[in-house]
Amino acid sequence: MDYNFKDIEKKWQKSWEDNHVLRVENDPSKPKYYVLDMFPYPSGAGLHVGHPLGYIASDIFSRFKRLKGFNVLHPMGWDAFGLPAEQYAIQTGQHPAITTKNNIERYKSQMNMLGLSYDWSREYKTSDPAFYKWTQWIFLKLFKSYYNNKTCKAETIDTLIQQFENSGTNGIQAACGEEFNFSAEDWKGFDDKKKSDVLFNYRLAYLSEAWVNWCPQLGTVLANDEVKDGVSERGGYPVERKLMPQWSLRMTAYADRLLNDLNDIDWSESIKEAQRNWIGRSQGSSLTFKIQNSTSNITVFTTRPDTVFGVTFITLAPENELVGKIISAEQKAKVEEYVRVSKNKSERERQTEVKKVSGEFTGAYAIHPFTGKEIPIWVGDYVLAGYGTGAVMGVPAHDSRDHAFAKHFGLDIPIVIEAPEGWDILKESYDGKEGKCINSDFLNGIDVKDAIRVAIEEIENRGLGKGKVNFRLRDAAFGRQRYWGEPIPIYYKDGIPTPMDESELPLILPEIDKFQPTETGDPPLARATDWKYKGKYQYEYTTMPGWAGSSWYYLRYEDPNNPNEFASKEAINYWQNVDLYIGGAEHSTGHLLYFRFWTKFLYDLGLVPFVEPAKKLVNQGMIQGVSAFTLRLKDIFVISHEMDLQQEFAISTYPLIYISKEWKEMIRTDETTRQHLLSFYNEVFKILNPHLEKRKFEVRFHNQEYDSWFFETHVPVKLVSKNDELDKTQFTKDRLDAFKDSPTSVAIKFFPDDNAPYFCTRAVEKMSKSKYNVVNPDSVIAQYGTDTMRMYEMFLGPLEMSKPWSTQGISGVHNFLRKFWKLFFNENGDFIVVGVDPRVDPASAGATHGSPATAAELKILHKTIKKIEEDIERLSFNTSVSAFMICLNELIELKCNKRAILEPLLICLSPFAPHIAEELWSKLGHTTSVLKANYPKFEEKYLIENTFAYPVSFNGKTRFMYELPLNLSKEEIEKQVLASEDAQKWIKDGTVKKVIVVPNKIVNIVLG
RNA sequence: GCCCUGGUGGUGGAAUUGGUAGACACGCAGGACUUAAAAUCCUGUAUUCAUUGCGAAUGUGCGGGUUCAAGUCCCGCCCGGGGUACCA
């Protein structure tokens, strides 16, 4: 009986499903373990070989934990709202719900094909009202909460209102947009609209006028992390800045906790570092400057108050309101023009012009708070409106951007921190935090680090400002002008945004006829007919962003079908937070931050008993594709000497000439080759266009730069062989097909020899449809089976490392499984395992059935049991696959076919190759799934050795091995080794200076 | 620029706490079986020199250092991958 993976895998996948063996219940008698894969967005392209890497790893881990007696929650569901389905809907009219459903089915079937042990009874999708009811519910909680900086937690907004009624803003320390100051009487005098506006300054989910990343093509705003290089991450459309009313979440209130709690979680250092940088905490001081001839002040934030005596100017952001108030008459026109231009600059332009210095003098002066000197106030777009106070104090000698600005506009650059010897302060600013203050009055002679503290104290004493912490982190934009997302459960009553009652949820996403914005520019939801709260009040038209559902989804798996709560207390108390979270690193500052933020919020409300969503996080590496390229010569000009030929050229056939890499170099350097190419083209052109044969024309290279002579284009990897040779026939056919409907006719030719093989160049890149380098798991599975695929992906290398996909080496893994199978069956297909069958009563079986394992066999087994367990615990799956191979090689050597060895080994293997394991398990006579087995217990006693072979080295170089009994004293070891013949040979005439003995490790002899 | 990663044979990689560098696998070479091929099995395979055998030297991106001992620790560079970007 051969290893027929096709039948085996189909059979067991069906059996697991039919018998619900993967279903998991809350079982307080067992310890729990929660393994979660990052929430997939089911895209239309299906899974490629890169996706399963993390899924397989988490699956192996889950199956292992089950064998170790844990009750393992390992669920899967769908992040089903999102832009791609909606874009597709706009283009095709296909409802996003349908697209999404189809994509989910495809994903699910591919996942099942991989033998992933998900408990599908817990599956859900975020676009299901039963799910998004709770997303809306959490939104309402955010809406109804504010962040109390005194208690450092979110509290109900009612207590804030109570305080306003009692004592106004007096004594309130709350996270807010701007610092308000009003009395209880003021508050009571506000009308409802005003009260609502004031409260939005405090709510954790709030509506405000805000600068947003507006993407006109997508017709929506995007979060910072959805914008890459000034264009939308999905789709690559330009993004510009726009001021509009905007729902946001006050994530900044949690900045400190998001930062500090990173210390307590077992996440990769790189992700934590990325989050720390994203949150961007900086400690410094505020400092207020009086403006000359004005009642206004300018407050700046600085991390370097120690350099305050080096301030020679102040720069305001173009958006800063003060600009309009202070400009002098003669500067007015220039400044206003500058402000207008910079405000209209798109994000992209601002980014590409980072190095360009621009600005305008406002004509106004501030007074230096310490020296009393006049300092000019400028406007410059290197100052960001959204960070700090939108104003900076310019210290050109010690800040590189201020330096560039001062140099550009000819402002003073006085030095106030001692720079290292030879530093040319006019050339480059000294930004370092080492050195002593100079030219700085009371700070003179103090080290920078102390000076910062002293300066802040002085600033506070004089009432000029106070020590302060700033964050780079922004509040998260939470509204999307989109259809395919969760409706925001808010309606407008007399212009006041009003929350729905929790009991009225879910607010169902209405059906609409078209998915575009309306003619008046309202979001698509404005198209919904008769969609009004109580038939009267307009609902909020924007929907939630893609990351809303994924910010809390892990909790729903704990109790997925609960209609009364997002998850029951019992379920949450049992399953707690995620123990192991596996996914790609691309979510480091988006999802993973929101996910942590929502968890902390739910904790504050007493809804969950933990502050972090995931204890341990591992990023699987990316599996890259190996792309292939062709080089094509761009047009060579065909030049006619006779004007009347134009007509005929129009109906000519033009050759597309492909040139291999080596020839490209030749053409560059070698004139003869270049002539060769010309005549090649000429010839081909003549053959293709016999109607021109007798006419005079000339072919010439164009004069552009050499590198622009060629196009490098992706070619589908399917058309390229292992040794990089292009399938010219198919390639030519495909290319010609592409030109079928084009008015130009073309021919495909290869230089220098059309009949010779053409070799492509290769490059490792991200696996993507657009790069034509996608490899599907389906074909690999069809050829080798799922178990091989699973083990091979693990064998490829450490989980966290990125690597290009290659099937080189897959045969080694496949052979391993076939050889493993052969331990159980001989060539005739007879089952050859000896030992007591559990189906047979041991009493009646007698000794003949038994076949005790030898010490050697037991040693191999237990070595492997130990190794596999350790490797899985540290997620080192590549080394565990090697360990299995070593074990197998050794058992084959011993011709071992004993149940006492093979049965426990089979259990160890089952997380990796569950199908073959299940099949052999049943052949061994078991009637329950191997999933229910217990991981074999490691017994140290089988590994105990009597001797150890010492590597003996001289001056650190290993020379020979010397076997000695264990438990010898260091002195005894030294004595015996030195006395040995080998050692004597190496010592010869030298003197032994020293001998290092590390028992059971090494002996090193130092010769003089 | 800054931050995070990684750099070991022809290839993927192993070496978990400073203690035999190259496990395991692929590939390649030779052999067995076969009319032949495939499959399977056996042997060899870091490099250089030596080769009749014993062997010897070099070697983990580069240059230094610490140590009896360094792929592993320290200092200074180079290169690849990822992230980030006027954050005062």
Image (cartoon, rainbow, N blue to C red):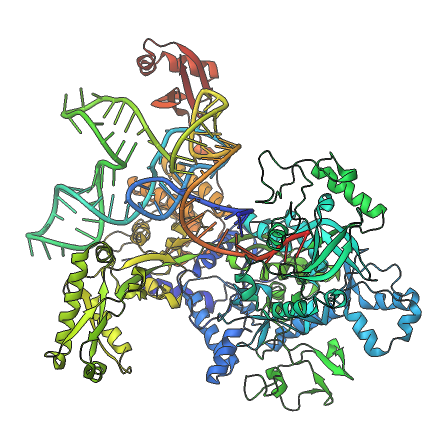
Is residue A919 visible in the rendered structure shown here? Answer: no
Task: Give the residue at x 50% y 45%.
Answer: A874
Residue B15: where, in percent of width, then height?
A: 43, 37
Task: Tell me where residue A982 sits by quadrant.
Answer: top left
Is residue A457 visible in the rendered structure shown here? Answer: yes
Side (left or right) of A410 relative to A973: right
Task: Give the residue at x 35% y 66%.
Answer: A772
- Of residue A210 and residue A704, the one placed in the foreground of this image is A704
Name the quarter where the N terminus of chain A is drawn: bottom left
Residue A328 lies, with reference to residue A588, above or below; the image says below
Task: Tell me where residue A634 sits by quadrant.
Answer: bottom left
Residue A743 lies, with reference to residue A830, above or below; the image says below
Task: Give the residue at x 48% y 79%.
Answer: A88
Residue B85: where, in percent of width, then height?
A: 57, 57
Residue A910: where, in percent of width, then height?
A: 43, 53
- Of residue A713 and residue A572, the one placed in the foreground of this image is A713
Task: Give the residue at x 78% y 66%.
Answer: A202
